Image (cartoon, grey):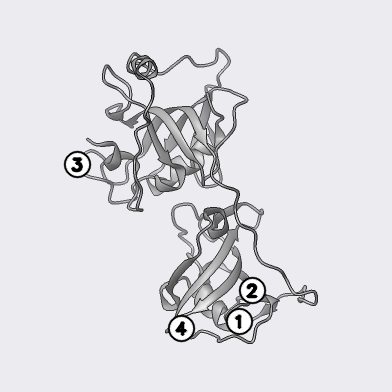
Amino acid sequence: MTLKTVLFSSLLCVIAISMESPTMRAAEKNALEPGPADKGAPKDFTSTRSGLKYRILRKTDGVKPTSRDTVKVHYKGWLDSGKEFDSSYGPKGESIEFPLSGVIAGWTEGMQLVGEGGMIELEIPFELGYGAAGSPPDIPAKARLHFIVELLNVKQAPKPLEPGPVDEDAPVPFTTTDSGLKYRIRRKSDGKKPTAANRVEVHYKGWFDNGETFDSSYERRNSIAFPLNGVIKGWTEGMQLIGEGGMIELEVPYDLAYGAQGRPGIPPKSTLHFLVELLQVK
């Protein structure tokens, strides 16, 4: 089974095997098993808001990665049955390097909890792994995945972009539409307003009620373009309220977002908040 099949989602991503000195490569090939865990490492798992379970097996003061960073790791993964389905360890084992934004959601979240030089154990529910379908033949449907991961190195991404300026007289209170969508115009514009049939290019960031950011094009330093009728209802409605060059803040109730069921990385019945700059209407 290849590493790409096991770790990587359908997002475009490239695995870069690090090029190192012969001495360093020999040392890694001798790493037949994971390194030592702390004597006081917790036996119990901690659960995050998304449903991910983890425990830090080796603490470190090293830098913690963000979702934008590239990490180099050693790891092994197994199913509930104990069957190992992939590992970078072994006589011919090589560490791997990849962008943290290009793997399954459980890895993207979990690896941000441990510092460089540390080791973490992850228990990933299927919603944060390969979903209800799994990844046959090695990952069954609705499979819960277990991993031990050693974080060897963090390559930090460039600093994220910042949103553009807000009007000095931008309103503080939100306006509520008939659908329940709440919005406030942060920067007015006389530019063209899109319709649901248009394709738009935007910069945005999204966060939960608790202020936790779950997605951001500013962090990736890349705007995105998409058909406005191909996104959540709150976006389709909200983006038609501003002109090209404008900025809007949206508070999207769950029934205009991902519904009662949520989706990987988005808990059920989540109210979502967005700041969006409309760069172009196509």
Q: CA distance from mark 4 to mark 1?
A: 13 Å
- Is the residue under label 3 in contact with that under label 1 (CB below 8 Å)? no
Q: Is residue 44 visible?
A: no
Contact (Cβ within 8 Å) of mark 4 with mark 1: no
Asked which secondary structure carries label 1, the reply is loop
CB within 8 Å, label 1 to label 2: yes
Is there any visible trace of residue 211 in the rendered image? Answer: yes
Of badges 4 and 1, nearer the viewer stands 1
* Residue indicated by mark 3: 137
In the image, farthest residue toward the front: 21
Q: Which comes sooner in the sequence, label 2 or label 4?
A: 4
Residue denoted by label 4: 196
Q: Which mark is residue 165?
A: none
**Disc on the earlier residue, 1 or 2:** 1
Instruction: Name the quarter where the N terminus is drawn.
Output: top left
Q: Amino acid at mark 4?
A: Ala
* Residue assigned mark 2: 248
Given residues 85 and 35, the one toward you in this image is 35
Quarter where residue 115 is shown: top right
Image vertical order of residue 14 relative to residue 196, above or below: above
Q: Amino acid at mark 3?
A: Pro
Left or right of 86 on screen, residue 153: right
Q: Secondary structure at mark 2?
A: strand
Give, as a three-letter code, the residue at label 2.
Answer: Ile
Left or right for 159, reference 50: right
